[in-house]
Image (cartoon, rainbow, N blue to C red):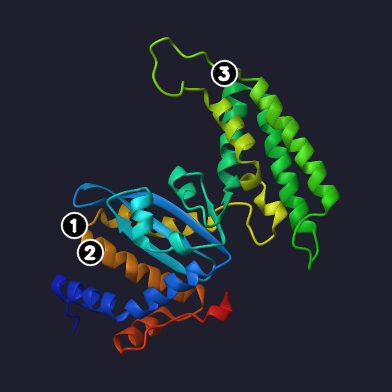
Amino acid sequence: MHQPVSDATVLKASEECAVCIAPSTEAVKEQLRASEVLHVDESGLRVEGTLHWLHVASTSTLTDYEVHAKRGHEAMDDAGILGAFSGTAVHDHWKPYFRYEGCGHALCNAHHLRELQFIDKQYQQPWANDMAEILLQIKAAVGETPAPALSLSPAQLEAFEQRYDEVVKAGIEANPLTAPERKQRGRPKQPPPLNLAMRLHDFKGQVLAFMYDFRVPFDNNQGERDIRMVKVKQKVSGGFRTLEGAKRFGRIRGYISTARKNAKNIFEAIREAFDGNPFIPSPATH
């Protein structure tokens, strides 16, 4: 007989599962805080009919999801990871991340490439295509450098830095600052090409972090992939009816993602959690 499972049974099981995996959730947070490189990202999520935010902190072997009403540092503080993190955080330049000064920062160059492509097509500014080529050439040079090297050679670093500076200068010169209106308050709004050129100038070290330290990736694809899975769930079933339900889903989804990354059978991991022995990845695996 095919007996349908009631909604109440599923709800009760998810509540119990979230409690059973609590030791794993805390262990993953601790290991994320101790990691050398951490991917962080955030995306909107519908909860109780209003916009909330899904925050992810992850590595190739660990995933932690947090759902919060806020997008900025208040939510990040509540997640309890970045405040105690001292490695390198990879992200997309969302400003609240820079509030955490106890760690290094690296910017996602996949985002930069998309912005450069837009500027090249929309504004026909040659420097944008030149910068994209430089970033891809540096990425190729990193990939071609044999172990045990941990960075490009001093000669390569100097040559790439010089070319980078020249292109950034060209980008700034191609977009002179707009004089603010007399009664305008605050910083005058500038066009996208100048905003990007200034960012590449001001955050040169964070943009090129991947060539100075091979542990740092070229982009934040790991964080984007991890957050995309939950976004797919929202597209299929809509938003969450309660904040607690959304947070519970995040904890369980983080547990499943971590198990999968460690080649652990998902059904075994869930069964072991209900048996009082949730899967906890070994720190040695990452």
Q: How far is disc 1 from disc 3 in space, using C-alphas?
A: 47 Å
Position of residue 124 measured from the top left corner of the image (x, y, whole percent): 63, 22
Please say if the residues under marks 3 and 2 sit with CB atoms less than 8 Å apart. Answer: no
Q: Is residue 102 visible?
A: yes
Above or below: residue 284 compared with residue 224? below
- Which is more N-terminal, label 3 or label 1? 3
- Residue at 51% in and 82% down: 282
Q: Are marks 2 and 1 in contact (CB under 8 Å)?
A: yes
| Disc 2 residue crowd, few under 14, some 14–19, many 20+, Cα 10 Å | some
Residue under circle 1?
241
| Nearest to the observer: residue 100 or residue 222 | 100
Three-letter amino acid code at the position of disc 1: Arg
Q: Nearer the viewer, mark 1 or mark 3?
A: 3
Residue at the (16%, 76%) spot, across then down: 9
Q: Which mark is residue 201?
A: none
Report the residue that reaches farthest toward the top.
182
Q: What residue is disc 2 on?
A: 245
Q: Earlier in the sequence, mark 3 or mark 2?
A: 3
Q: From the image, state whether disc 3 or disc 2 is nearer to you.
A: 3
Image quadrant holding the C terminus, namely bottom right
Instruction: Assign the N terminus to one quadrant of the image.
Output: bottom left
| Count of residue discs | 3
Residue 117 visible in the displayed image: no
Which mark, residue 177? 3
- Say left or right for 178 vs 274: right
In three-dimensional space, the C-alpha distance between marks 2 and 1, rounded to whole angstroms, equals 7 Å
What amino acid type should be assigned to the residue bearing mark 2? Gly
What residue type is disc 3 on?
Leu
